[in-house]
Image (cartoon, rainbow, N blue to C red):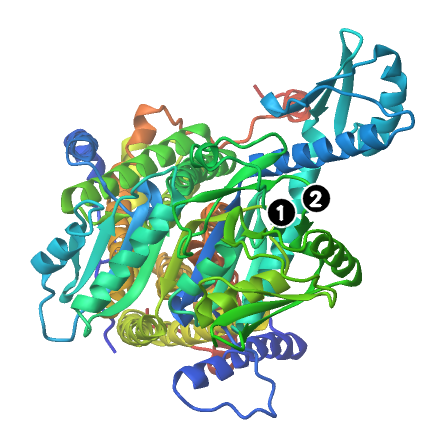
């Protein structure tokens, strides 16, 4: 039986030759993502900004009467709601800011009023889920989310540093920052809701993007020991090429399952899955084009992994009369 | 590396089958088949977002505890000074700034007063600190300040009993299997599966249910009361919403009333004449005696029934009430009367609780998520297996077997962990992701074997080297994933935690299935067939 080979044997693609243009494009993309996040802002979910959110499902095949719902809720006097279709035309989310931080009873009343209004005007509609978060809690959730993200990135980089060399740790950290920034850029661009689940997705893609980095780095380390005389760019190219088949097969496997989840899975976690899916793309790219070339600039030496000669060994060598 | 003695094979298969079989009851149930009850039935615990239900987080206001302690101390000090022999006369007690301060009229009584007050303080914390500090300034002014340790202890105690009260009230609602846990120093998290609209629950928990009976101050001038000015020794209390007196207030005597914490029972009943809903209460013997004394001494005068600082009604005492039971009538519906009865039965909350976060999801939406997640899983898994088979042939077949076992084992471990690990919506994504990621180890190994063959190594040697050389990268990759998952678990809340749990379990089982099991299978095949070449 002839087996499928996505990548032919013994490829010799000079990835590293294009490192400057690729880096320029990537840094440009990162800058654009950051700019986009500032200009467009992120569509933060209620767990990050406080407020309340109700998911309403209208009968299958109909279109949610967005304008009516907006008017009805606006008439309650708590302000205008933010309405958003959730994947299908008959499912919407109704979001409201909190009326007054100091007055929890008012929040209670608002939630009750909105529920009652929806039930009264749209008896066919089904309230799937409702969520309300106070400003205090949302502040905490946002802070812990960001702290978790930073801690994960730093913790993983330290691990790489300990297992490899500091240059690899820095390279990994840079690649991670790249992946996270671009994914956040996507959320700024599409205005998909950015909530606690997305932070979990970012943490996940940090983990999996690292997978790729490690496989390439592991091979770099192996080759550094094996081919002492090979110039670094050539050695890095060789390492990337040797692991290329694995990189492509693994990423394809992940994408197969993720695309299934994206198309057929629960729409409630669409954003979550989308973030991880994009992260797999970006992560694969960054481990080849970001994390590897940076080793040249950070000055990895061919003898980085040659164990230092101990004093006893040196003595023995002299005793044997070697230079 | 490729040596698997029989005992080791049996041992590995035993672990695999045990964990994989533990998932069967859950899978069968999702498919809609009743699992026979006489068989052991470990079940995967579903998070609220899949099972449907309500989650609310309540927060107490710690300053309220401080205020209450101040009031209690004020009453205690006042009584002690009054009852002292000879009586110790003091000036007005000031409670501003969270401290209690008062002036002795006779400075020579300082030591006597200190001797009386000191027993009111107790040790707090391990450092030998007291819960109050007593200072005497300018010779005759006492200043009592709450210490941080004392306040923390009081808040902790208040939260402890508040959690108990919350539990009693929810149990009285008859909902199934609520989870009630304290979170942090001043929060309580309540999860109730199956409860679609948490409104009733919030109403019940939002009620402090502090019941008081106080005499109405008949000497207060109506004009002053309307302006909120109370005569000395009295306070102004507004009427509750929905009562005939709504919008107005009355003056009641601050001291000499009865608190509702001496109740033994409370029930919703109907008043016989008007057939309107009322709450019948039953005092304990001491409370009953005090209630009898209060009513016999004040026949003909009105007394106010005050709930959470609002007057429900202020009836006239027509005759002494000696039986220790009474009826509270207000403008109740059957529901509100029943709710009040539950709240009174479970005791008053020592602190007010406010809802700072809530989340509810319908069971239909949860079930829909499970169905869609299962479909995505089956489709994704099938496509992935086809991909593995066409890419790696026989080795791909081992990979597929490892994948299925891995999936079953993750579910099996979750079922065995029971309530310690709930499957949440992001957890389903974690499950799908674990499947995708679990093949990575096999891909690394297979690619390495392919490479070693290309370098001209013989079959057995290539396989051995493939497993050996790949294991380093597999190990490192899984450690980094574990770091990410552990951080998610530490910082995440409910659903995200569920995701982290799946990832962590998946990391362990996938290394086991993808590395150990496939190696065993490959080794068995090599031994039986002794192939001279492999297609890879």
Label pair 1/2, CB-CB below 8 angstroms: yes
The front one of B326 and B217 is B217
Give the chain of mark 1.
Answer: B
> Residue B299 appears in which quarter of the rendering?
bottom right
Between discs 1 and 2, the one toward the N terminus: 1
Side of B352 where A46 appears, left or right: left
* Label 1 environment density (alpha carbons within 10 Å; few <14, some 14–19, many ≥20): many
Residue behind mark 1: B215
Residue behind mark 2: B256
Residue occupying the point 23% across, 68% down: A119
Residue occupying the point 31% across, 58% down: A112
Q: Quadrant of the C terminus of chain A?
A: top right
Q: Position of residue B414 (x, y in %)?
A: 52, 69
Q: Quadrant of the N terminus of chain A?
A: bottom left
Q: Position of residue A94 (x, y in %)?
A: 21, 55
Side of A248 where A303 appears, left or right: right
């Amino acid at each position: 039986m002839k087996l499928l080979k996505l990548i032919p044997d013994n490829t010799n693609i000079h990835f590293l030759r294009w490192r400057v243009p690729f880096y320029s494009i990537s840094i440009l993309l990162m800058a654009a993502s950051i700019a986009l996040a500032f200009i467009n802002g992120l569509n933060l979910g209620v767990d990050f900004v406080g407020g309340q959110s109700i998911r309403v499902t209208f009968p299958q095949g109909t279109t949610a009467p967005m304008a009516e719902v907006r008017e009805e809720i606006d008439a309650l006097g708590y302000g205008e709601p933010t309405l958003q279709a959730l994947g299908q035309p008959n499912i919407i989310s109704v979001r409201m800011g909190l009326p007054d931080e100091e007055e929890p009873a008012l929040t209670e009343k608002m939630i009750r009023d909105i529920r009652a209004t929806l039930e009264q005007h749209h008896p066919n509609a089904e309230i799937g889920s409702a969520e309300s978060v106070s400003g205090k809690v949302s502040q905490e959730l946002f802070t812990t989310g960001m702290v978790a993200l930073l801690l994960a990135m730093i913790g993983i980089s330290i691990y790489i540093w300990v297992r490899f060399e500091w240059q690899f740790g820095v390279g990994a950290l840079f690649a991670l920052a790249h992946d996270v920034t671009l994914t956040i850029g996507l959320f700024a661009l599409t205005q998909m809701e950015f909530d606690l689940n997305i932070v979990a997705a970012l943490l996940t893609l940090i983990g999996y993007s690292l997978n790729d980095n490690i496989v390439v780095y592991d091979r770099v380390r192996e080759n550094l020991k094996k081919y002492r005389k090979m110039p670094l760019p050539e050695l890095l190219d060789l390492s990337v090429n040797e692991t290329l088949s694995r990189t492509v097969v693994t990423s394809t496997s992940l994408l197969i399952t993720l695309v299934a989840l994206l198309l057929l899975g629960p729409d409630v976690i669409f954003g979550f899955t989308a973030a991880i899916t994009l992260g797999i793309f970006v992560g694969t790219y960054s481990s080849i084009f970001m994390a590897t070339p940076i080793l040249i600039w950070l000055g990895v030496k061919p003898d980085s992994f040659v164990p230092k000669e101990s004093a006893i060994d040196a003595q023995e060598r002299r005793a044997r009369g070697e230079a | 590396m490729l040596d698997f003695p029989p005992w080791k094979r049996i041992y590995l298969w035993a672990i695999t089958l045990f964990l994989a079989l533990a998932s069967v009851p859950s899978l069968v149930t999702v498919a809609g088949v009743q699992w026979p009850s006489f068989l052991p039935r470990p079940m995967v615990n579903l998070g609220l977002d899949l099972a449907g239900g309500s989650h609310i987080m309540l927060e107490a206001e710690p300053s309220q505890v401080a205020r209450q302690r101040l009031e209690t101390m004020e009453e205690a000090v006042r009584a002690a000074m009054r009852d002292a022999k000879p009586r110790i006369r003091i000036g007005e007690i000031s409670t501003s700034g969270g401290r209690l301060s008062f002036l002795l009229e006779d400075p020579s009584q300082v030591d006597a007063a200190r001797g009386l007050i000191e027993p009111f303080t107790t040790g707090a914390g391990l450092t030998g600190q007291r819960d109050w500090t007593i200072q005497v300034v300018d010779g005759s002014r006492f200043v009592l300040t709450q210490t941080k340790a004392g306040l923390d202890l009081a808040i902790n105690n208040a939260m402890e009993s508040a959690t108990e009260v919350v539990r009693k009230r929810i149990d009285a609602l008859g909902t199934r299997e609520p989870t009630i846990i304290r979170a942090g120093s001043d929060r309580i998290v309540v999860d109730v599966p199956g409860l679609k609209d948490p409104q009733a629950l919030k109403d019940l928990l939002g009620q402090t249910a502090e019941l008081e009976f106080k005499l109405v101050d008949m000497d207060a001038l109506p004009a002053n009361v309307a302006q909120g000015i109370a005569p000395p020794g009295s306070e102004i209390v507004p009427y509750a919403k929905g009562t005939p007196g709504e919008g107005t207030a009355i003056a009641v005597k601050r001291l000499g009333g009865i608190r509702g914490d001496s109740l033994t029972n409370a029930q919703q009943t109907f008043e016989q004449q008007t057939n309107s809903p009322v709450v019948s209460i039953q005092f304990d013997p001491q409370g009953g005696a005090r209630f009898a004394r209060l009513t016999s001494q004040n026949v003909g005068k009105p007394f106010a029934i005050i709930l959470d600082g609002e007057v429900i009604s202020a009836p006239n005492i027509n005759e002494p009430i000696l039986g220790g039971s009474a009826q509270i009538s207000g403008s109740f519906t059957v529901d509100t009367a029943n709710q009040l009865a539950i709240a009174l039965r479970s005791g008053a909350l020592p602190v007010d609780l406010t809802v700072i976060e809530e989340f509810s999801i319908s069971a239909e939406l949860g079930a829909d998520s499970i169905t869609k997640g299962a479909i995505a899983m089956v489709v994704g898994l099938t496509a992935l297996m086809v991909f593995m088979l066409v890419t790696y042939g026989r080795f791909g077949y081992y990979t597929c077997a490892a994948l299925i076992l891995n999936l079953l084992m993750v579910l099996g471990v979750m079922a065995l962990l029971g309530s310690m690990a709930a499957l949440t919506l992001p957890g389903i994504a974690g499950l799908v992701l674990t499947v995708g990621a679990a093949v990575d180890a096999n891909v690394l190994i297979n690619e390495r074997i392919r490479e070693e063959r290309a370098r001209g190594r013989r079959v057995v040697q290539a396989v051995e080297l493939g497993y050996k050389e790949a294991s380093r990268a597999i190990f490192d990759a899984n450690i980094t994933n574990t770091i990410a998952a552990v951080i998610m678990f530490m910082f995440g809340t409910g659903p995200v935690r569920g995701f982290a749990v799946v990832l962590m379990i998946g990391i362990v089982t996938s290394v086991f299935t993808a590395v150990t099991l496939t190696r065993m299978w490959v080794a068995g095949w090599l031994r039986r067939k002794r192939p001279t070449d492999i297609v890879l």
